[in-house]
Each structure stands twice: as C-alpha cells, then as structure tokens.
Image (cartoon, helix red, strand yellow):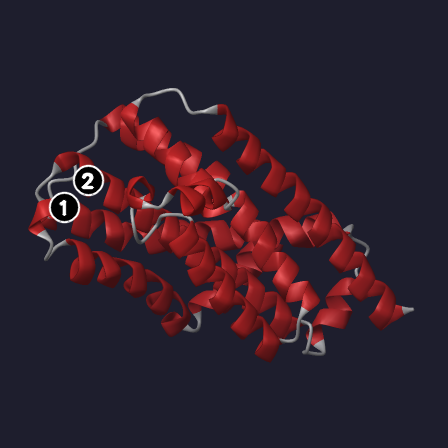
Amino acid sequence: MHVRALLLETLRVPIAIIGSMVFPAMSLLFFVVPNRAVADDPVLATQAVISLSVFAVMVSALFNLGLTIAENREKPWDPYLRSLPLPPAVRISAQLTATSALSFASMIPVLLVGAFATAATVSASGLLLGLVVLALTSIPFLLLGAAIGYAFPSKAAIAVIQVGMFGFAFAGGLFFPPQFFPDWLDALSRFIPARHARELVISAVDGTAPDLWMLAGALAWTLAAAALVLWLYRRDEGRRYR
C-alpha cells in the first residue's frame, strides 16, 4: 500500500519523472553520439551506454528518494504516518521499491538512444544479467538518497545531492572512461560506488568474472549506507517525537 501511494503521488507530477528520464539520454545524445570514434566502436559505445544507464539510475535514486523524504519531513502528513504501528523498515523499503521502479524507467531512453544511434551491442542474456546487476548495484544510491533526505532539510538536500551526483559521476568514470584516468584518480575511483556499479554491470554484460575489489566495494557501501539510514531515521524520530 505504501509503494502504491508513493508511485501515485509521483505520477501526479509528471515533470518530476520527465526530468530524470531526459537528462541522461541527452548526455548520451549530445556527448557520445556526435563522437563517432566512440559511437561507432561496439566496445566503447556499449561501455558508454552502460555508464550513462548507471548515471540515470543514480540520478533518479538520489533525487527522487532524497528530495521526497526531505520534503515529506516538512509536511504534517509525515508525523501521522510515523504514528502508524509499522516498523521503520516498512516505510523505508516502500520508498526504496517505488524509487527503484522510477529509476529503471529513467534508464529506458538511454537504452533506446544507444540502440538506434550507436554501435552498442549486447546479447539477450547479457542484457538480462546486466539489468539484474544494475538493480543490485543501485541499492547504495537508494540508501544514500534516503540518508540525505533524513539528514537535511529540502533546500540543503538539493545542494548535497547535486554535489554528490556529479562527484560520483566524474570520479566513478561515468562521464570519462577510467582507462584514461591518471593513476592517482584511477586508484581513488575504486572507492566510489559509481565505479563499482559501472564495472560490475560491464562485467555482467560481457560475461566476465568481476574483480574482488568491485564486489567488496559495492557490499561495503551497501552495508554502510543501510546502517546510516537506520541511524538517521531513528535520530530524526527521536528529535521530532520524543
């Protein structure tokens, strides 16, 4: 019931969905497609589509979840929902599920542009496995979005999300391939969740075994972000309802 209500609430403001769906696809259309050295190379084009698919999911997760939670905390409806006899995990999991659905919707334009305007190629099994891995690697972004929403008011949350979004994207190799990074930046990016997501999805699509640092990094960010969200939720609850 919580998931259904959250989806309906978002769908009543279509521009909130259109913005997160258009921006990643426009990035692919304006920065990758005109560069024929990349767009006509099946390997580079596929990696570019994967990178911007990760970016699309990340943007939707951070903005939709972070801003929604921050804004809801400033509305009188939120205290009523908190008074219901439900554990925090129910509300948090509902918000994560609803945002996940919107995040994958934002990836569809990227895949369409990649399919029709570049030489990107993928097998059916690679596409299916890539989507599964992308769903799993999106969990840290969802949790980080929730953490921002519980930690900051809405006006501050916008700034934090924007800085985090572009910081993760650039340092994680979503806008510029990591193989062209200097050594120090390549080493730093291995600690960024966007880099873990990018490399794990590429490995899934290519059918190759991922490196241990990718798996360890994604798991560490997931566990740390989950613990942070629960702590911030309880801190917010203690401050507002004691």
Q: Give coordinates of residue 63: x percent, y percent.
A: 49, 64
28 sits to left or right of 119 = right
- The residue lying toward the viewer, choosing from 188 and 152, is 188
**Neighbourhood count class around disc 1 (C-alpha, 10 Å): few under 14, some 14–19, many 20 upward:** many
**Amino acid type assigned to the residue bearing label 1 in the image:** Val
The C terminus sits in image quarter: bottom right
Q: Specify whether 23 is left or right of 5.
A: left
Asked if labels 2 and 1 touch by Cβ distance under 8 angstroms, the answer is yes
Element under disc 2: helix
Which residue is pictured at 44% across the width and 71% down the height?
12
**Quadrant of residue 148 in the image?**
bottom right
Report the front residue among 148 and 71: 148
**Which SS class for mark 1?**
helix
Q: Can residue 1 be seen in this view?
A: no
Where's the N terminus, which quadrant?
bottom right
Q: Position of residue 162 (x, y in %)?
A: 47, 68
Q: Mark 2 points at which residue?
A: 44
Question: Which amino acid does the dot numbered 2 rest on?
Answer: Leu
- The residue located at (71%, 70%) in the rendering is 78
Tell me where residue 49 appears, x and y as whole percent: 25, 45
Q: Residue at (16%, 39%) from the top-left corner? A: 120
Q: Residue 178 placed where, x, y %?
A: 34, 43
Residue 83, by quadrant, is: bottom right
Q: In this view, does 34 lie to the left or right of 4?
A: left
Residue name at image x 74 percent, y 51 percent: 230
Q: Which of 211 and 13 is in front in this view?
A: 211
Earlier along the polypeptide chain: callout 1 or callout 2?
1
Reply above or below: 44 against 155: above
In this image, 106 relative to 95: left or right?
left
Q: Mark 1 = which residue?
A: 38
Give the CA separation, mark 1 to mark 2. Answer: 5 Å
